[in-house]
Image (cartoon, rainbow, N blue to C red):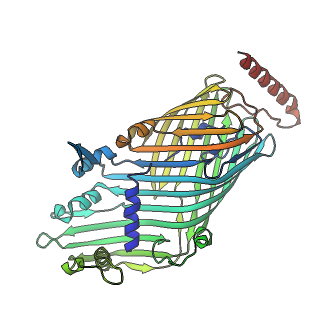
Amino acid sequence: MKKSILTSIIVCSCLLVFGQQDFIMYNLRDVPQSIYSNPSNRFDGKFYIGLPGLSSNYFSLSNTGFAYSDAVVKRGNELFLDFDNLLNELEDDNYLALNARIDILSFGITLSERTQLSVHFTENINLRLNYSKEFMEFVYRGNGAFSSSTVSFDGLGLNMNHYREYGIGVSHQLNEKLRLGLKAKYLYGMENIYNEESDIRITTNQNNFALTGSADISLKTAGIDGVDDDEETMDYLTGRANTGFAFDVGGNYELNDQWSFNASVIDFGFIKWKDYVTNYSNNGSPFTYNGVDINVFGDDDPNGETSFDRVLDSLEEAMNLDTTHGSYTAPLTSRVYMGANYKINERSTAGGIIQTEIFQGNIRPSFTLNYNRKMTKWITLSAAYTMINRSFDNLGLGVVLDPGPVQFYLVTDNALGALLPQHARHAQFRFGINLIFGRNKTVEFHKPFQGVIGSSDEGKGSDSETESTNSNEGEESE
């Protein structure tokens, strides 16, 4: 329990430092990594390989509750923590998320004019936290501030994951209008904290400030407590018995020459955690906490237990937590995308995306408007505006450079967050380098399918390709 609490505190503290979601990338189909948001996307080329450790580096942070500038103020030449102002910014229920995703290796190949295959190995770290305003008040002001009432931490939820995914996907042109994609992912887990439920109610005695209350808690952990100090590095990286599966599915429908519609479901899956599992639960029975003897704050004992450890021990004992070590299954946080695009002209498109993230029964929607333009055959620029997690100042920008087989891309869904991070409640960026071979570059954005569907369409396919080639030659001479 002690390590679980300490890990949670450390991870949550990191959320204030590191910078989530993919909105601009969703429509950048020329970038192979766009399949991570919609597996039906088709990259332009015969073959691509992502440079190991460089093809896709993704970091994001989203917090509905507060920004850095809401909590830290400058007075003279010194910085102060203004917890009162922070509390004023909070809603009754708040949400915080961290994501980091780094590709170890990725590559894709065009099997035919209708079908592409992709493979990736990716390291993932993500955290989702639901927290209430009352919980933050209790942390700051202590139990004395609630001497005449009961504090409820109902809805407090935590889910932290560190896992690797091995994915293989197929994108296939079903007919001239509809393209579908499916990706299967094998998951290998390393650490996890999963809070299935928590309903904690605490009342403070007005005479002696002792805490009485009840707790209905189910906190499951893996790879946090009881880890073998002699575990070899390779056993940690590949040998733990924590495995699972997930699926991504997506589609894109070309209604006509101007309008197209798309949708996808990402990370629908789970991991079963078996190694180094420690679970804590309480069935709602009442407890009383009178504090600790002042002597616990003396010197650390020879066994390495600190005074803070002993305080946590006393809390665990008072709350009557049951400890078990049985395996458990934890779901991934799934995302749903739905979008529409309008082709303004050959070079430009505009569109909208509704994205929903589902975490412990809670739905977190966001909405994005985006604009994309091919400036030349090898330069693409993108802009977007996003509303997410009570944050309404998210202006996104993206650039893709394709001077040759080397492709470089950099996108962020909140450029202002990069310029003024102290005021941002949502920050996200992704960058990477790919090598793409066998491309037929054009200035056309979202080039329609030009292959053959059935023997009766062979002539149409050839005419379409010829027409596109002539059009490109004309634009080249322009």
Q: Is residue 240 visible?
A: no
x and y percent of residue 211 in the render? 21, 72
In percent of the image, x 64 and y 33: which residue is there? 260
Residue sitting at the far front = 77
Query: Relative to residue 228, is residue 376 depicted above or below?
Result: above
In depth, the one of 246 and 395 nearer the eye is: 395
x and y percent of residue 387 in the render? 43, 38
Query: Relative to residue 434, is residue 157 depicted above or below?
Result: below
x and y percent of residue 309 in the render? 32, 76
x and y percent of residue 35 in the render? 64, 45
In depth, the one of 91 and 478 nearer the eye is: 478
Horizontal relation, residue 112 to residue 49: left or right:
right
In percent of the image, x 25 and y 72: which residue is there? 213
Quadrant housing the C terminus = top right
Residue sitting at the far left = 207
Horizontal relation, residue 262 to residue 82: left or right:
right
In percent of the image, x 22 and y 78: which residue is there? 292
Q: Is residue 103 visible?
A: yes
